[in-house]
Image: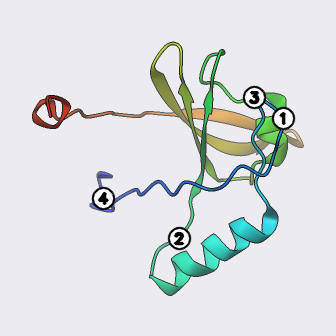
Amino acid sequence: MLNDGHVLTLEFMRNRSDRPGHFELSRESLTELRREARREGRRVVGLFHSHPITEPEPGKNDLRDASVNSLMLIYDVCGRSAKLWRVRRKGGKKVAVEVPLSIETNTDRDLK
């Protein structure tokens, strides 16, 4: 739940890559997801993915493929931590600015 009362929903998309350790989305799938979200009164604010063996910081390919002003949630599988980033343009280049992220856990749910 965001502070303004909106709910952030994660939608999983199919990996179009057959290369190990690589994830690729199709533009068509992303366009359809955006259309579906609009029909339901929602909007796509960014993308999320995991880094299996590196810190949860955007790499050059992550930034290259990201939209300016979008959010990027990255989960570090080994370190079991996540960071949230906003993609900005600075000096003609895309940069990632970390956004505070609060992760709440429900111990009752964790025990089930």
Residue 43: mark in rendering: 2
Seen at 33% across and 52% down, the residue is 2
Sequence-first disc among 2 and 3: 3
Where on the picture, by quarter, is residue 44? bottom right
Where on the picture, by quarter, is residue 4? bottom left
> How far apart are labels 2 and 4 at the CA level?
15 Å
> How far apart are labels 1 and 2 at the CA level?
30 Å
Q: Tell me, yes or no, whether the two marked residues, 3 and 1, touch with CB atoms within 8 Å.
A: yes
Seen at 34% across and 33% down, the residue is 102
Q: Tell me, yes or no, whether the two marked residues, 2 and 4, touch with CB atoms within 8 Å.
A: no
**Kind of residue at badge 3:** Gly
Which of 108 and 1 lies nearest the eye of the viewer? 108
Sequence-first disc among 2 and 4: 4
> How far apart are labels 4 and 3 at the CA level?
36 Å
**Kind of residue at badge 2:** Arg
> How far apart are labels 2 and 3 at the CA level?
28 Å
